[in-house]
Each structure stands twice: as C-alpha cells, then as structure tokens.
Amino acid sequence: MPPPHLVVTMCEVALQTWADSASGVGPFGAGEHHDVALRLAALSLATDPEEARGLLDRAYSACGSMGALTECILEPTARELGDRWANDDCGEYDVTMALCRLQSFVRELSAGRAQHFIAHPLVILVAPMPGEVHLLGASLDAEALWEAGHDIRIGFPDTELALQRLVAATWFDAIDLTLSLAFRREHRLSRMEQMIATVRRTSKNPALLVVVGGRVFHDRAVAGDEVGADGCAASACHVAAEFARVQTRLDFASRLLGTRLPAGSARPRLSAGTRDFDRSSAAR
C-alpha cells in the first residue's frame, strides 16, 4: 500500500484527469475532490440514489483503487452527511439511509477484486461497537483488511454481552472495532474503553490485538491507547498498515521479553454470530 501522501496525490491527479474527460460530473480539478464528496452527500440523501451511484462509479474509475476512493471520497462524504445533520439540514434517519446506500454501492464496486497473499494472515473480527447503527466504517475496514490478505470474520453483536460471548467462544488474533464515520460519538469513548478492557478479559486469546476506528479518531486525532486499544486508524485506507504496525511492535516486545503466544492461535473455529467475510455480509 502506498504511503498516505502518495495516495492523496494519486487521487488528485486522477480526479484532474477525470475532470478533463468526464461528462456530467461538473468542473473540478486537482485538490477539489472535496467538492465531489459534497455532491455525493447531497445525491445520497436524494429520493432516487441512481445519480449518486453513477457519480461514485466514475469516482472509483478516476481514483484507481478502493483505498484512494475511501480516503478521498467515501469518508469525506460520510463526514459531510454528519455535518449536515449537525446543521439541521437533514435528520438522523436520512444520514443512516444515505450511509446504507453508500455501503451497498461499495459492495457492488468491490465485486471481483483480488485478495493479496501474505504469509501470516491474522484472523480478524471486524465489528461495529455494539449500539452503533452506522456500519459503513466496519464495511470499509473489512474490505481493506480482506484485500490486504487477512482472514476476516464480520459480526454485528447488538450488545456488549454478545461481543464478549463471541470473543470468549472463538479464537481471534485481533478485533477491529468501529464507531460512526458520520458522527463523532465522543460521548462513547469512555464506554468504548471500558468495553475493550472487558473484551480483553473475556477473550479466548489473552493476547488479542485491538484496533479502533471512526470519525472521532480522524477529527480529534485520538490515540488508540486513550481507549485501551493497541492502535487506531483514522481511515480505512490505513487500517491494514495499522494492524501491521501494531503486530510488529508487539511481536518485538514479545521476543524481547521471551514470551510466546499460546499454542493453537493459528487457526480459529467459527462460532455463532460470525461469518466468513464476503461482499454480501459487508453490505448488511
């Protein structure tokens, strides 16, 4: 995966090319992908979402990768939807429906993409924080981690107890826990910290890796350790790199201390409440 500054640069160049050649998109050039996000937000709130689907299709072709599309278009669109709600320009239900539409479009765009091979993939549970109704962040993270070569299980535990039972019954190397991409949810950070501590205590894997994401980690630059996580990703574009960074750091500490992960960590058994990641589950 290219460094973040290169991803943005590639996106800007692609959007400039798109602006020069595409019809019906509107005039914009390099550095103006924010305008595309503004328009996509407006179109995703419309009664007929087909124009939004077409705009996103063209943006994907211009960006050239799901990572660039995510960071340059999709996540800014989600934040714009949240801002419109904060300014009383739309209701919370409208935001939720718009995010669901974007999630469905992402599933369509992702069909047929290839998974990279890595020698030691992590088995990762990707889940929204229990009570979180906005699932786009979890869907984008699952797509990115799957494409990076990891073994993804996606789950939607509706309560904290359900999440605890899930990690207690099934071995996971890691968990990716997300909050809304549209709303900041700052009031949920303290609860997230308590929940992560409980999940670690109940996990079948005593060395469970935890990475968190959501708008609050983008806007406030909140560090993962502030909520008891091993890391955080301000964008789904960087979530695979964040897991790699965390794993490298913890592996080094393990070797330094002469400790080893418990036997049996290589392969989990599926339990109720999770499924192998596929594009249909990511869109639910």
Image: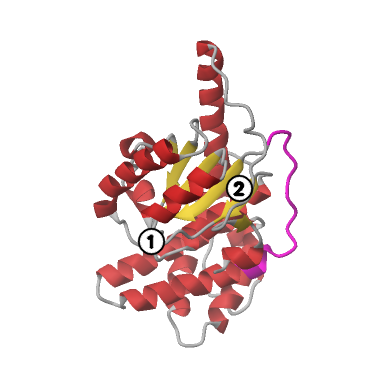
Residue linked to disc 1 = 132
Which residue is at a point 66% across and 34% down the rendered structure image?
266
Q: Nearer the viewer, residue 204 or 253?
A: 204
Instruction: Pick out the residue farthest to the bottom.
Output: 47
Residue type at numbered disc 2:
Leu
Q: Where is residue 18 in the image (x, y as percent from the top left)?
A: 63, 65
- Rounded to the nearest whole Å, what is the CA distance between mark 1 and mark 2? 20 Å
Relative placement, left or right, of 59 versus 229 is right
Q: Position of residue 112 (x, y in %)?
A: 75, 62
Residue linked to disc 2 = 145
Mark 1 neighbour class, 10 Å CA radius: few under 14, some 14 to 19, many 20 or more: some
Q: Where is residue 190 in the image (x, y as percent from the top left)?
A: 26, 45
Write the start and end of the magenta stretch as one range: 107-120
Relative placement, left or right, of 201 versus 279 is left
Q: In this view, does 146 lie above or below 248?
A: below
Could you tell me which quadrant the N terminus lies in?
A: top right
